[in-house]
Amino acid sequence: MERSAPLATPLDDSWQAIWRLSWPLLLSMSVGAASLLIDSWMAGWIGSTAQAAVSLAGQVAFLYIATTSVVTIGVTALVARAVGAQDWPLARSVAGQAMWLAMAVAVLLGLPLYVFGPHLLAGLGIGPEVLVMVRQYLHVSIAAVPALAAWGITAALLRSLGDSRSQLVASALSAVAIVSIEGYAVHAGWGVPGLALGATVGDWLAVGYGWWRLLKGPLGDGLRRWPPLIPEVLGRIGRVGLPAGVQGLLRSGASLVFSSAVARAPSSTAVLASLTIGMRVESLSFLPAFALGMAAATLVGHSLGAHRPDQAKRQAWRVMGAALVLCLPISLIFVFAGHWLAMRFSTDPAVITHATHYLWWMGLTEPMLVAAIIGTQVLQGAGATRYPLLVTICSLYLFRLPLAYALVPIYGATGAWMAMAASMVINGVMVTTRVWQGSWVKTAV
């Protein structure tokens, strides 16, 4: 007899199932976004240069996290289907293999990226005063490299089981540590390294709690024993996860290159600081989409594992509709109250102006971004990860980046915001069309 069962059963095709999985994820992501906003606010007390540095260091971290998606997305698709089929031996085997892969990614990719990340940013034209603080941040947060890899797998396994509440508790513990340590660090004059210390401790706390919850659940035996590597299972994880990992790397790389384009605008430090504020405020608007999308990925995986493709399609459209309804009020706030929001995070008039313009453009196109988020999560939950990779190449590398470099010399920072908005529309149209076609339910994993 299994020690526990998933919180959402494979055949549960109700709004209650979606809500039961989604609300803890929404709160979890809200807590994470709030801690990022507080992080940016505290960096603002140090100065706009510190805000820009924390943003760029965060992009290096996101680039690393993107590499771990090779494992996390493959694991989500495989374990969710195994849960749907009630194939617990396969679920345990995948969980054990995933931890080996996560540690390999941490050692082979994470550590070098944190060491050489500042050199990468220097090559993109980031100013020396910002780079000094980026190095300070990364030299401390390199201790979080194993934790970030382990947390990605831990959260994916919890969601695949339907246990989104444990992810919420882990995120809350992490946020409390981050805010407490960073608040003390700023008042004690520790500067940017103090902010990095808070983030690092928070990451390890989340991993510790999440791992403890997994060991008590139905996957515990697979994790406790860390089984020998099984090429067949590794291959299945890789087939699903590799396109997603490449997609994540391309997205993070595009973000860094986009920052380089933004840095070419007049008053580049103020513009980069406004980008930090704008992106973190904007993240609040698509929190419901990410939470619902994660729930959709789990439910779609369960349904396909139980051989219920029609149910999987129905769940996808229900979730997308709910996400669009939830995001619209926040989009309107960005359009009409962006200036007020920007003033909450900076006293620099130039930063406030650029952040206001950013939020206006993002508010106009946010529904398309939300549709793309949900659609991508649905496709990834089904294991159909190649098409989202194609969408990323088209929307970012064929549209956003060339447009940004073409428009910034003409319109300054506003040109960059225009390029970003255009790419969101393209992304949303391509992904939504694919979900509507429905061929993704036939994907073999």
Image (spheres, rainbow, N blue to C red):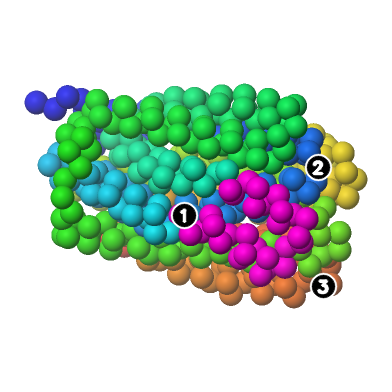
The amino acid marked with disc number 3 is Pro
Identify the residue under disc 3.
409
Magenta span of residues: 110-139
Q: Which quarter of the picture shows residue 326?
A: top right
Q: Nearest to the eye among marks 2 and 1: give it.
A: 1
| 166 left or right, relative to 50 | left
Residue 99 counted in the magenta span: no
Residue that badge 1 annotates: 111
Mark pair 1, 3: CA separation: 36 Å
**Which is nearer the N-term, disc 2 or disc 3?**
2
Q: Amino acid at mark 2?
A: Gly
Residue type at numbered disc 1: Leu
- Say if residue 30 shows up in the picture: no
Residue 264 occupies quadrant: bottom right
Is the C-beta separation of discs 1 and 3 under 8 Å? Answer: no
Q: How many marks?
A: 3
Across and down, in percent, residue 193 comes to 65, 40
The image shows residue 262, relative to residue 298, as above or below, that is: below
Question: Which of marks 3 and 1 precedes in the sequence?
Answer: 1
Circle 3: element type: helix
- Label located before the other in sequence (2 or 1): 2
Q: Residue at x 84, y 45 (%)?
A: 352
Dominant SS in magenta:
helix
Which of these two is toward me, 332 or 193? 193
* Label of residue 47 in the image: 2
Q: Residues within 10 Å of mark 2 (few under 14, many from 20)?
A: some
Looking at the image, residue 311 lies above or below residue 45: below
Which residue lies most toward the left here?
Answer: 1
Q: For the residues marked 2 and 1, what is the alpha-carbon distance in whole angstroms? A: 28 Å
Give the percent coordinates (x, y) of residue 275.
Answer: 73, 52
Image spot of residue 122 (x, y percent): 68, 65
